[in-house]
Amino acid sequence: MMIVLVWLHLLAAVAWIGGMVFLSLVLVPILKREPFAAQRGALIRTAALRFRLVVWSAIAVLLMTGPLLVMSRGWSFGEPGGWPAVLTVKLILIAILLMLTLAHDLFIGPRVGRILQTPEPSRTGHDRLLVASSSWLPRLSLLLALAVLFAAVSLART
């Protein structure tokens, strides 16, 4: 049973992080090329909406399997003082990553989508700033996810 839990946990992490790497390093750079300029926004939105289902499914699996794996190692959620430091770091990084993902999916992404539907001259300075900075949130999320992965590997070695 334990091997199935570990496999599901790893599969969910691979789907989420692998998808983030693919979008950041493959799809978005390709769509920035000239032949795709006219469809770039629609293609990125379509891919992101499709990926959102993968992300939240992966999060559900991770949130179900993670606590079971922690308990299987004999660590109690009621006694965080007895956890290895790397577990605490991993959980903090996960909490930040989940908050960023929620903010992106529920607030920032939809807001940027609405802004991009309005003509450029009618956008406020705040709108322009939000659109310009919105591409950094997925990059930050990817870096956090890679840090979580590093913490997970470190934790597996304890």
Image: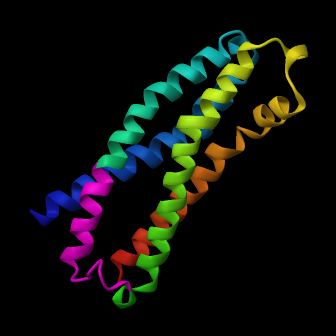
Task: Tell me the quarter of the image containing the N terminus.
Answer: bottom left
- Please identify the quarter of the rendering in which residue 51 is found: top left
Left or right of 63 in this view: 21: right
Left or right of 143 in this view: 64: left
Task: Tell me the quarter of the image containing the C terminus.
Answer: bottom left
In the rendered image, residue 34 lying in the magenta stretch gets the answer no
Image height check: is 103 above or below 34? below
Image height check: is 83 above or below 143? below
Stretch of the chain drawn in magenta: 61-80
Q: How is the image coloured?
A: rainbow
Image height check: is 124 above or below 84? above
Residue at 67%, 20% in the rendered image: 114
In the rendered image, residue 79 lying in the magenta stretch gets the answer yes
Q: Position of residue 96 (x, y in %)?
A: 54, 60
- Would you say residue 23 is visible in this rendering? no
Residue at 31%, 47% in the rendered image: 60
- Would you say residue 66 is visible in this rendering? yes
Task: Tell me which secondary structure the magenta stretch mostly adopts.
Answer: helix
Residue at 58%, 40% in the rendered image: 104
Q: Position of residue 108 (x, y in %)?
A: 64, 36
Q: How many marks?
A: 0
Q: Position of residue 124 (x, y in %)?
A: 87, 26
Residue at 52%, 29% in the rendered image: 48
Q: Position of residue 35 (x, y in %)?
A: 71, 12
Image height check: is 37 above or below 103? above
**Which residue reaches farthest bottom?**
82
Q: Nearer the viewer, residue 46 or 24?
A: 46
